[in-house]
Image (spheres, rainbow, N blue to C red):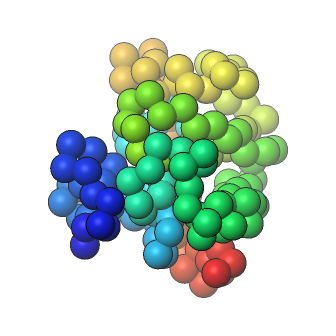
Amino acid sequence: MRDVSHDIACLVCAANAGEREVPGGVVFQNDLWVVVPAAPPYGVPGWMTLQTRRHVGGPAHFNDAEAASFGPTLRHLELVLEQVTGALRIYTAALGESFPHFHGHMVPRFREMPNDAKAWEVFDLPRLASLGAISVDATEAERIIEAYRIRLGSYGPPG
């Protein structure tokens, strides 16, 4: 269903409205937020994005409900992602360059990372995967997606 803020040129809006396929499917959604896995080829298993349901560029433009919910929601989503993946921590970044629709990346930081990447280097991993320079176990990535979906289905973010 299209949000009233739907931008017909926005691929995130199209995916949120069910007009565009989301590889791996929607992991979690409520009235404000949508969580989806990063698309293959995978740079890191368990890489997720938190998106606003509403078309908005970023936190500076959140409405009051989004602003009040953002911190508690992000904390919960990342805590559950840590638990499901066994990651040391979750990297968080929102750049807004590819799509001008808020999408925050939640990237598990494992003890052993593809290409020994750490910090900002992780954002080059999907490109390296697309070139065949690194390989991430797709079965493990899909297992994490499903485990995260199940866990959030029974223990979603605070309302």
Residue 58 screen position, x and y as percent: 54, 45
Which sits in the foreground, 139 or 4?
Answer: 4
Where residue 17 sits, quadrant-wise, is: bottom left
For residue 44, above or below residue 141? above
Farthest residue to the bottom: give it. 154
**Number of numbered markers:** 0
Q: Is 24 positioned to the left or the right of 117 in the image?
A: left
* Residue at image coords 31%, 67%: 3
Residue at point 81% right, 44% down? 88
Residue drawn at (74%, 66%) of the image: 72
**Where is the C terminus found, in terms of image quarters?**
bottom right
x and y, in percent, of residue 109 in the image:
72, 38
Q: Is residue 150 left or right of residue 129?
A: right
On the image, the x and y values in percent for residue 26 come to: 40, 64
Q: Which of 155 and 68 is in front in this view?
A: 68
Side of 2 relative to 24 (left or right): left
Position above or below: 147 against 133: below
The image position of residue 137, as x and y in percent, is 49, 40
Seen at 37% across and 36% down, the residue is 99
Residue 6 visible within the image: yes
The N terminus, quarter of image: bottom left
**Left or right, residue 94 beside residue 146:** right
Along the line of sight, the residue nearer the viewer: 4 or 1: 4
Say which of 150 and 70 sits in front: 70
> Does any portion of residue 77 appear in the rendered image?
no
